[in-house]
Image: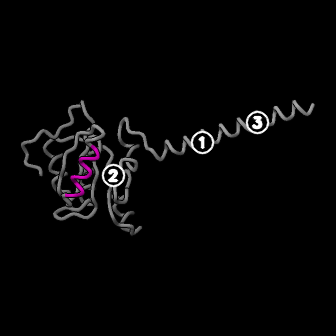
Amino acid sequence: MFDGNENHINNGNAFSVLVVDDDNVVRTIHKMMLEVKGMEVQLATNGKEAVDLHRVGACFNLILMDKDMPVMNGYQATKELRDMGVNCPIIGVTSSTEEAELEEFMEAGLDDCICKPLTIEKIACYLPGVASTSTANVRDDYDDYEEVEDENADRDSNTNSNNN
């Protein structure tokens, strides 16, 4: 994926995301999902490629890091990126549900860890201009509750004034 000739530096015009995953299908799905939302996406097939991109001056607004990869895994890559001074959010993406493994991955320097399958809703808080539908639904439910409460208060008020 990384050939050293591409422009990997965020020029400030688009939100850039580095997707690091050894599975071609997963990389493709994540790339398409992010590009639909207007993100600029760069791909890396393992942690070493992600580290090498940063060594040649790449800069991203967000990194999505798989945990289990050949050459250099997500734990090692995240630790090395943090040691290099990379301070953008790094989100671990894994199919593992083992608490000890997830804790170790987080301790490498992740900002968050998400279980696959990855969805826009799961990372919406890290993406500009993308509202989490789950948060919107909670807000909509709360608004519906307020409307019912207002209607009940109006009805109670009318009942009390009719009884007087």
Q: Quadrant of the C terminus?
A: top right
Name the kind of residue labelled 2 in the image: Ile
Instruction: Estimate the x, y position of residue 132 in percent, counting from the top left.
Output: 43, 43
In the displayed structure, 44 sits above or below 38; it is: below
Q: Tell me the mark number nearer the camera, choosing from 1 and 3.
A: 3
Q: Which mark is residue 142?
A: 1
In the displayed structure, 70 sits above or below 9; it is: below
Name the kind of residue labelled 3 in the image: Ala
Magenta stretch, overall SS: helix
Image quadrant where residue 36 sits:
top left
Q: SS at mark 2?
A: strand
Q: Is residue 125 magenta?
A: no
Q: Which residues are magenta?
A: 25-34
Q: Tell me the mark number nearer the camera, choosing from 2 and 3.
A: 3
Q: Image point 91% across, 34% down: which residue?
A: 163
Name the kind of residue labelled 1 in the image: Tyr
Cβ–Cβ under 8 Å for marks 1 and 3: no
Task: Decide which of 133, 48 is in the foreground and name it.
Answer: 133
**Residue at mark 2:** 91
Give neighbour class at mark 2: few <14, some 14-19, many 20+ (Cα, 10 Å).
many
Cβ–Cβ under 8 Å for marks 1 and 2: no
Instruction: Estimate the x, y position of residue 88 in percent, counting from the top left.
Output: 30, 43
**Residue at mark 3:** 153
Q: Earlier in the sequence, mark 1 or mark 2?
A: 2
Q: SS at mark 1?
A: helix
Label 1 to label 2: alpha-carbon separation: 30 Å
Label 2 to label 3: alpha-carbon separation: 46 Å
